[in-house]
Amino acid sequence: MGKYIQIHGSSDKFEVNNIFCVGKNYLDHIKEFGQSEAPKKPVIFLKPNSAVTGDNSRIALPVINGRKISENVHYETEMVVAISKDGINLTEDEVSDYIFGYAIGLDLTLRDVQGEAKKSGLPWATAKGFINSAPVGNIVRKEEIENPMNSDIELIINNERKQFSNTNLMIINIYKLISYISTVFGISKGDLIYTGTPKGVGQINPGDELKAVLSNKYELNVKFDG
Ligand code: MG
């Protein structure tokens, strides 16, 4: 199913292809989980295309046999990089040519399901990849983002600030991440890369209104219906 995200300041849309996500990319978030070591290599996982949803979305959990699949959904606010063309084996110097733009996104996570998976050594796909688990704001063309390596990211829930950080605190920066992903998986036109969350993750509750903001300017608004 084709997924399209609005391009900021334009009537054009960005067609989404693969969705890559980076885990453990801010030390203060790693410490929230009682760990202290930064990973030596990028921690990468994927979400299906059906995870993407745009600004002003409403999100409801999947229901199986009359029960919601999670009792503990977490928000993770992340800068998202949008890819403009196909590439493999890119060096860090080459990747800027392959970036279309940036957006603010949420890597919604079923923390209880993820905890069970971790305990059993099973994959995270259900915990991380359910429908609408990857909301993303309008894509801002790279020319409009002054310094993607030094951009504020913020999350406000029901008018209360829950996360505030800066992309300069990433352990593995955007260029290194894209170089790595291009070498292992290849990158393709339309890919989105969620670059990891800083500290302050927490649970969302039915009725919550989430506003994520990039560079104090570019917003993503979603409502969680439970
Ligand atoms: Mg994340």
Image (cartoon, rainbow, N blue to C red):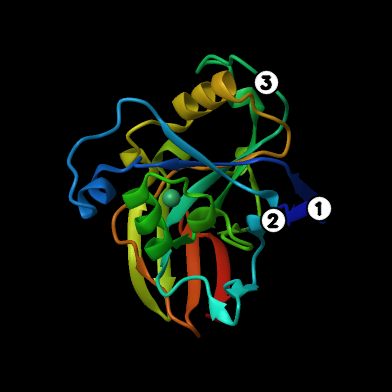
Q: Earlier in the sequence, mark 1 or mark 2?
A: 1
Give the Cα separation between the discs numbered 1 and 2.
Answer: 7 Å
Q: Earlier in the sequence, mark 2 or mark 3?
A: 2
Which residue position is annotated with label 3?
87
Q: Amino acid at mark 3?
A: Gly
Q: Is residue 151 left or right of residue 200?
A: right
Residue nearer the viewer, 144 or 203: 203
Which residue position is annotated with label 2?
50
Q: Amino acid at mark 2?
A: Ser
Q: Is residue 137 above or below residue 173?
A: below
At numbered mark 1, what does the secondary structure look like: helix, strand or loop? loop
- Which residue appears at 60% of the width and 71% of the height? 62
Q: Earlier in the sequence, mark 3 or mark 1?
A: 1
At numbered mark 2, what does the secondary structure look like: helix, strand or loop? helix
Classify mark 3: residues with Cα within 10 Å, few (<14), some (14-19) or many (20+). many
Q: Amino acid at mark 1?
A: Met
- Which residue appears at 65% of the width and 56% of the height? 52
Classify mark 2: residues with Cα within 10 Å, few (<14), some (14-19) or many (20+). some
Asked whether the beta carbons under mark 2 and mark 3 sit within 8 Å of each other, the answer is no
Classify mark 1: residues with Cα within 10 Å, few (<14), some (14-19) or many (20+). few
Q: Is residue 24 left or right of residue 143?
A: left
Residue 106 can be seen, yes or no: no
Which disc number belongs to residue 1? 1
Q: Nearer the viewer, mark 3 or mark 1?
A: 1
Q: Is residue 5 left or right of residue 137?
A: right
Residue nearer the viewer, 145 or 70: 70
- Which residue appears at 44% of the width and 57% of the height? 77
